Amino acid sequence: RRQQYHNRHHHLIAQIALSNVVYCLEVLSTMSKELIIENELIVSHPPRQKDSEASGELTEADNTLVQEQPTATTASESTMSEGWKDQDEEDNSIITFDVGRKLLSKDGSSSSLISQNSFNKIPSPQPSRTSSLRMSSRLSEITIVETRSSRADKLLEELTINKLKISSLDLIGRDKEKSILQGCFQRLCQGKDGDVHELVFIKGYSGIGKSVLARSLQKEVEASSGGFVSGKYEFTATDEPYSGVAQAFGRLCNKFQDFPSETRDKIASAIRENMKEEALMLMSMIPEISVFLDCDDAHSSSLHSSISMGREHERWKYAFRTFTRILGSAFSSIVMVLDDLQWADISSLEILDYLLSDVQNPHALMIVGCFRSNEVDENSILFNRIQTLQGKHQRGIFRLTDIELQNCDVGSVNKIIMSMMGIDDESKTRELAEVCFKRTLGNPFFLIEFMRMLDAEGFVKFNLGLLKWVWEVAEIEDVTMSTDNVVDLLKSRMKKLSNDVQLLLQYAACLGASFSITILDFIWNEHARGTLGAGEADDNVDSMMKIAQGIQLVESCGSNELRWVHDKVQEAALSLSHLVTPSFQCRLGMFLYQGLDPSQLEKHLFDVADLVNKGRGTGLLDVAVLNLQTAKKARKIAALQSAAKYADFGIGQLPTDKWTLHRELTLQLYSLGAEMEYALGHIDKAEEYIDIILNRKDLTAMETLPLKKMKAQILATAHLRWHEACDYGLVILKDLGYNFVWSRSLIPIQMLMAIKKLAKRVKKVKVEDVDSMHVIQDKKQRAVIDILKLMKHLTYSANTLPLCFLCVCKVIEMTLDHGISLCSADCFATFGGVLMFLFKDHAAASHVCDLAFAFQKRSGRRHIADTMHGAWAFVLVQIKPLHEGLNLTMEGYSQGVRDGDPLDSTNCLINRFVLLPYMMGRSLDSIMKEFSKIAPQLEESGITNNILTLKVWWQMMLNLQSPPMETAKRLEGDQFRQSEETAESNMYVGNVNLAIGELLLFFGEHEERAKRLLGEEKGKTYSELVQGYPPHGIETFHRGITWFAMAQKTGKRAYKSRAIKIRKEIAKWVEKGNP
């Protein structure tokens, strides 16, 4: 009650004060034409006709309010008023006075009940002839007086009561959608057991309020110690990689500037420990990481490396995920808004997927993606990515919520208008709202611009005499028409600005959704003034952009940075005149390319290239060089799609004599283009580029090596011609002068001889000798080792093991003869497996693995997963206790992910969470509890064999927990259906046969198991198809149980002999020291 009383009391005081102001204005309107207040005289404009609301007349209440005021005046006022009695009907001069300060406060300040206010020109009675004569003697003073009118204009500009309250508008008519969004955030904060990732899509037409709805979460997030950041994509720069994501992460980094130094130091320490090299990679696109690191932290390995595009792509995935986990530890939650996703590049959409699918991130993460639903169809990359994300949501990897916004109804439009005008009575604005609804269809952004236009044109105005907004509905209906293009309204508003400001806005629009004032100033002074003769006035860029900020076209987004308040504003600026054509943008881009210093160009390289590429000329050498530079930068940050586009555009700019005069530039563009197209899966385009290069006879073997290597990979992975790929690999080595194969028919003999000879040599090498070995330097030798490494994988996949082992031997020979390479460690680990597989030499194999780890220490993290997997899965599993492999394989997985090696890292993952726990006899429940966590990582890797391995073993364990019924003996269930799978790899067939064998064994179906072993499984057991891999031991042992059971049951000699053979084999394992 007390609060209500105070509210009524203050409201009454306000009414009295306003009534007094109106009275003072009425008194002044009858005063003499001359009134000096503090020696100032202000000359104003001619009077306007009376303003009214919808009816055009003062209401009865208004008249009553005026009539009820006292009429007493001072003596001086009376005297001055008498001079106006004889009026000249033809003299229409009107004078208004700067009385605002005197009326508003006693001390002359402008603070009062009506804060920062001035008054409209109030019409006065016309003066008499006598007054006019006296006025003529003052004509000499008019000039001086007019110069002082700027003070009155300034006061008027500073007022708020007579302006539409647009900046303070709240969400209106979006209560349901806001509640859904808040519910998602509250659910995020309450998430448990890793269920802490949310994805929200807000979709609708342009200007519908998607961004405003997303930003409505900011206060709630920050109040709960969360981090709220946003990023935006541009319709003029759809090829610029990671732009929105980079903006968001940059703003997240900047938040740490306000954190205590202890927190920043903790984050910096975690970055250096877990992702130092990757953070330096990220710094190229997110310079704000310098809050934690600087360039002095850079580290370069002494070993030469050639990173494949696939590995590079995986490294960026690791970098973004790890960076998000580290930053997330400092906030209760992170909410990242990515606006205009319909223009996002494919690399950004992949990052969004990676972050949400990161099951190892325990911190709350919510991504809000806004996009225009009418610009996303089944042919867009966003549509396809949404389908993928929905599939992951259905599998429970994260939660996904869709919010679709519609246009506002008439009621909501009315509330928006009421809020802008500060009116409480819905009935007063209802007719105006209906007109605005018909003209704008209820689009909020369009509505705001429509109201701005009505205000600017005087169709709605604030009458300071009446202290209210007035308008004529009929007039508005007559002079406006329906249009669905808000750009037209924005253009009409811009065209009221000076020519220089309009030109500057067009330049700014060319620079993108956000732009640097420094770059804009450089363009204005060097390009606009010199080329177009602009800027004759003394206005500089800062003052002109403040004008744009004042009318809410642009807004600040950081130090020395501005951005458009909406992409429609940028679009309007671009179409403001016929100046901004593709050729103009191309010339502007070339001007920046040639005029910016190297550091500025590197920072804005994608923007500059996008401008230049809007021109469609050919044979422009500078454009080809620029696109090569931009494509290399895109490749460096694993933006495959963008790199491919820039390379392709650069190739199109090469002159006809490109191979004669510009050989190196041409070769680089075609090589980079082929690599990117292959990485994207565009095989035909990649092969087209490769053939152009390889058909030239004037190129050396080293120049064509990357293309030949790519051709071998395409033969194997795209066309599945593995043996042909192996043959082509031998051709590449021969071209390099390394012809090591005697004859294809003699490869098995050559292999055995090479292994025996090399085994004796390796046994003499001590672990400590590795530290003193030098790094191989010769480029051709490094190239030979690189192709031998490729051959190792091709021949293993083609199941030509003799050639595979021979390639491994040759790498080890070159390591011992010429020095260490990045392939040394994993080839030594593989050689240990060869010694174990062929000769069962545990001691020699163990020593070779020790050497492999020593070489790995010299190599750093590169290829560590390959080394760990090879050493453990084929050697140490038969030498060390099984539990020692848990940490080893886990390290191989984590380091392999960081190194961008999906194959060997997921091999380690399968060993760590599937094979080893089962072999160790851990409970099925404890094993399967981890499956749901590792399944997304395996799916993401795309390694089919490992994905199928998990599914087969998962279904087998589910069946083992089922009652012994007929259906439990078949691999048909929720996780895997054998009847629907068509894979034929040795790994897949071996896993299926092993799983069926386990089911039959534990359900006591020895006879059925024996029939399979003698029938469809003959020669295809796991141990025969996947030789030397960890489960072969348990599979062999369980197969022996079946033979013993059948020998006991039937007494047949065939079963007994098989059982005894397996028992002898296992006895040899014991003798060799297999624990």
Image: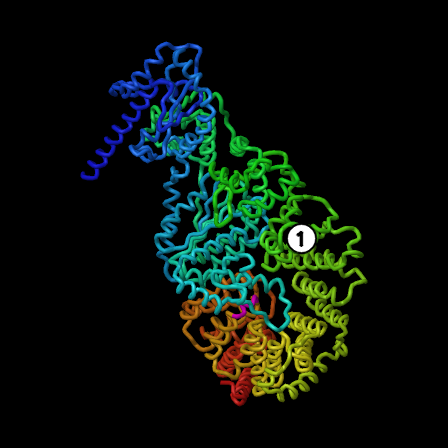
In the displayed image of the protein, which residue is found farthest to the left?
A: 1
Between residues 1027 and 427, which one lies in front from this camera angle?
Answer: 427
Where does the magenta region start and end? 895-900
| Image location (x, y in percent) of residue 378 | 56, 46
| Image location (x, y in percent) of residue 494 | 53, 33
Answer yes or no: is residue 579 visible: yes
Q: State the colouring used for the structure image.
A: rainbow
Q: Which residue is mark 1?
A: 627
Query: Is residue 264 placed above or below 94 in the rendered structure?
Result: below
Amino acid at dot 1: Asn
Based on the picture, tell me whether residue 899 belongs to the magenta stretch: yes
Badge count:
1
| Image location (x, y in percent) of residue 860 | 56, 74
Based on the picture, tell me whether residue 803 belongs to the magenta stretch: no
Answer yes or no: is residue 973 visible: no
Query: Is residue 229 placed above or below 73 in the rendered structure?
Result: below
Quarter of the picture holding the N terminus: top left
Between residues 210 and 41, which one lies in front from this camera angle?
Answer: 41
Query: Is residue 1013 placed above or below 410 in the rendered structure?
Result: below
Q: Main secondary structure of the magenta part?
A: helix
